[in-house]
Amino acid sequence: ISFEPAEISHLNKNKKKKTIFVHLRKNFKKKPMKGQNKLFIAIVVALILGVILGGIVHYQYPESSESFSKNIKLLGTVFIRLVQMIIAPLVFTTLVVGIAKMSDMKMIGRVGTKAMLWFISASLVSLMIGLVLVNWLEPGHVTKLPIHDAASADELLKTSKGFSMEDFVKHIFPKSVFEAFATNEVLQIVVFSIMFGIALANMGEEYTKPLIKAFEICAHAILKMVGYIMW
């Protein structure tokens, strides 16, 4: 059987596509989110061990429970601080790289709008869940703690003001990006990241390629750190 050069080229292209598809499918089958499954199992096991260990100390060694709880609390504090440490750089690098690589300004606008909407929606949902659970479960109601006289706080109540819409809008835009990073103000970091990414996207690939590559490497390094912290 003889083939024309065009037919041979077409067959080679189809063969390459098929080979790539099979290779991707094999890789996908080999790694069905194995790391995430291990992490989930580790979290569940740690929760069970924590409950068991806490029960043993509480019932078997009540005289040492206070000192034990203070010492074990340090581990939780260190973990929370490590998580807080990577939030700001992770948000900044991933948003900047994602937006700077887009050449279409309409797409950038859609992504930025969706990011802001997702953040505001998640904040509102979390606030609503908190309000519903607090009013429903009434935590601390059964303790019946004595209510102290609030007369000493009158001056503070008079000088303080409520959180208005104007304050919320002003809070979105950072006075200083360094202050936003230092205090982990995620919404302010998102606003700065979007504006910085748009600026890089409009400057042209010739100037911004090394900087975007550096941010991309930083994002991968921070994601590696996330894996280290979670494990």
Image (spheres, rainbow, N blue to C red):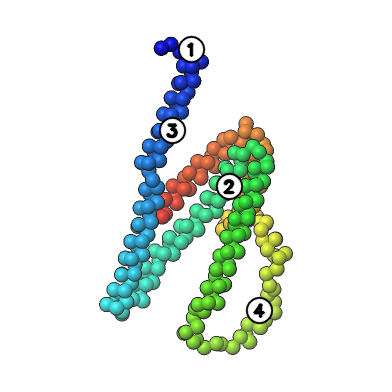
Please state the horizontal and vertical placement of residue 158, each as a whole percent of the image: 70, 79
Q: Which residue is mark 3?
A: 21
Q: Which residue is mark 2?
A: 95
- Few, some or many C-alpha atoms within 10 Å of disc 1 (few <14, some 14-19, many ≥20)? few
Q: Report, in whole angstroms, how far the alpha carbon at label 2 lies from the one at label 3.
A: 30 Å
Question: Are circles 3 and 1 on residues that touch, CB within 8 Å?
Answer: no
Identity, as a three-letter code, of the amino acid under mark 1: Glu
Quarter location, residue 27? top left
Please state the horizontal and vertical placement of residue 214, each as a whole percent of the image: 54, 39
| Residue appearing at x 47%, y 57% in the figure | 83
Q: Report, in whole angstroms, how far the alpha carbon at label 1 lies from the one at label 4.
A: 89 Å
Which circle, 2 or 3, is nearer the viewer?
Answer: 3
Q: Residue furthest right?
A: 166
Identity, as a three-letter code, of the amino acid under mark 3: Phe
Q: Earlier in the sequence, mark 1 or mark 2?
A: 1
Question: Are circles 1 and 2 on residues that touch, CB within 8 Å?
Answer: no
Question: Are circles 1 and 4 on residues that touch, CB within 8 Å?
Answer: no
Q: Which residue is mark 1?
A: 4
| Residue appearing at x 57%, y 42% in the figure | 97
Which circle, 3 or 1, is nearer the viewer?
Answer: 1
Which circle, 1 or 4, is nearer the viewer?
Answer: 1
Q: Earlier in the sequence, mark 1 or mark 4?
A: 1
Pick the quarter of the image with the N terminus: top left
Identity, as a three-letter code, of the amino acid under mark 2: Leu
| Residue appearing at x 33%, y 66% in the figure | 48
Per the image, label 1 sits on a secondary structure element best described as loop
Q: Earlier in the sequence, mark 3 or mark 1?
A: 1
Per the image, label 2 sits on a secondary structure element best described as helix
Which circle, 3 or 4, is nearer the viewer?
Answer: 3
Which circle, 2 or 4, is nearer the viewer?
Answer: 2
Q: Which residue is mark 4?
A: 156
